[in-house]
Image: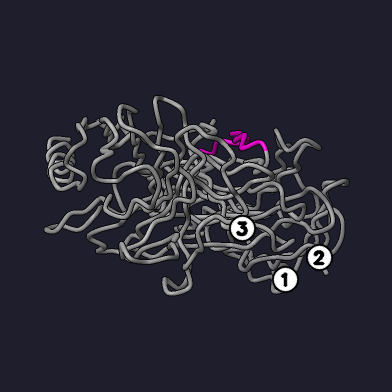
Amino acid sequence: MKKTVAFLIVIVSLISGCTFNVQVLTPAPVVGSATPTATRQIASPVATISATAVPPPVGFTPTTSEPIFYGAYASSDARSVVGQSAFPAGTKEVFAIWTYQNMHAGVMIKREWFLNGKPWLLREGPWDFAKYGEDGVVRDISIYEDVFSLPPGVYQLKIYIDNVSQPIGRFTGDQPETWLNFEILPTESISESISPDQQWRAVVLGGHILILRDTNGTPMELFDGREIPYFAWFPNSQHILFIDRERSEPAGTMAAIRDDLWIVDILSQETRLVYESDTALGIGSGFVISPYSNHIASTEGSGGGDACFVDTRLIFFETASDYRSVKVLKQEQFSGLPTLPDSSVYPTAVGQWEDEGQFEVPLSVTCTLNKALPGSYVFNMTQLSAVKK
């Protein structure tokens, strides 16, 4: 924690626009968030940095005679006329550029910076009319760190004139947003998935932050957890299933994993914990969501084996119509599976949904000479039965 505070102080000392007073907002400890705050709108990674050029917001012509800021964008070049939504790891400076009108001496300006959805920096002071004048474009405000580079993460900027939030962002309907978003990518790899209707992109940033971007590039944070190893879209393109993983001692062993299963509604941003496991979920298979119904197939267990015992079994989830809860069906509840003393029946590959409520998966049986027992079995969710094909 002492290192974090010291690092933030270094960053503050290097912020441009020295006429503003500076206040460091020490972030709260990072914890899992089941109900994200609506204002935690953030940017997500993109595959190619050179493809992230974003033009300033268009279509907004201020009609007010009051002081106003609008058309903000972020860039690594103060002279740029287009913005970027993402910057590579190691970026040392990012400029916030915006247009202003009707300004006059005496108005108070406040800039709020957020990093990964948490308050980061607050700067405020009077408008420098002698420097900027009444109308124009601000191009000399930036955050930068020459020695270590800016920390990776998702940034948000809000600006106020006399405590009135300004319409600096892009349009969402008929009004511009009151925030600017961009991201500095981490050095570690990221994972992403496009929704079935191609309208949304879900991304896990830094291994633990689930974020979302629509086709217009509007970003939002859905969940900040411990570790998100698996996530998957439901066929309706409105809900995402994901695991929040807790690792404990002894570190590095599967026996030390405890997984929670969550469902998030991307429209309401409501996140629901639907199942708590005392071991790992999705080892070797992740999730297989039925395209025909509201069923999910996965595995539960560490995946380890000892003699005739294998710690892996099938588990199925049936979601409620509102996706706020699930019914759990475990492998041992299904009739028709091989039952031998001192043996284990476990999946050996990722299965597939054949139709509504019918899941086919290859199974193996330990410590048996009966070659007829292993093979593909079809699990019936309604009859709770398994039949060998």
Q: Quadrant of the N terminus?
A: top left
SS of the residue at dot 3?
loop
Would you name the residue on which mark 1 appears? 375
Please, is residue 153 above or below residue 79 in the view? above
SS of the residue under disc 1: strand
Count residues near mark 1 (Cα–Cα under 10 Å), then give few for <14, some for 14-19, many for 20+.
some
Q: Which label number is shown at residue 216?
A: 3
Which amino acid type is shown beneath numbered disc 1? Gly
Whole-Å distance between the Cαs marked 1 and 2?
7 Å
Q: Write down the quadrant of residue 272 in the picture.
A: top right
Q: Quadrant of residue 159?
A: top left
Kind of residue sitting beneath label 2: Lys
Callout 3: few (<14), some (14-19), or many (20+) C-alpha neighbours within 10 Å?
few
Numbered label attached to residue 388: 2
Residue shown at 65%/44% (left/top)?
A: 266
| In this rendering, position of residue 165 left or right of residue 234 | left
- Between circles 1 and 3, the one closer to the viewer is 3
| Labels 1 and 2: the sequence-earlier one | 1
Q: Is residue 163 left or right of residue 76?
A: right
Disc 2 to disc 3, how far (Cα)? 48 Å
Cβ–Cβ under 8 Å for marks 1 and 2 = yes
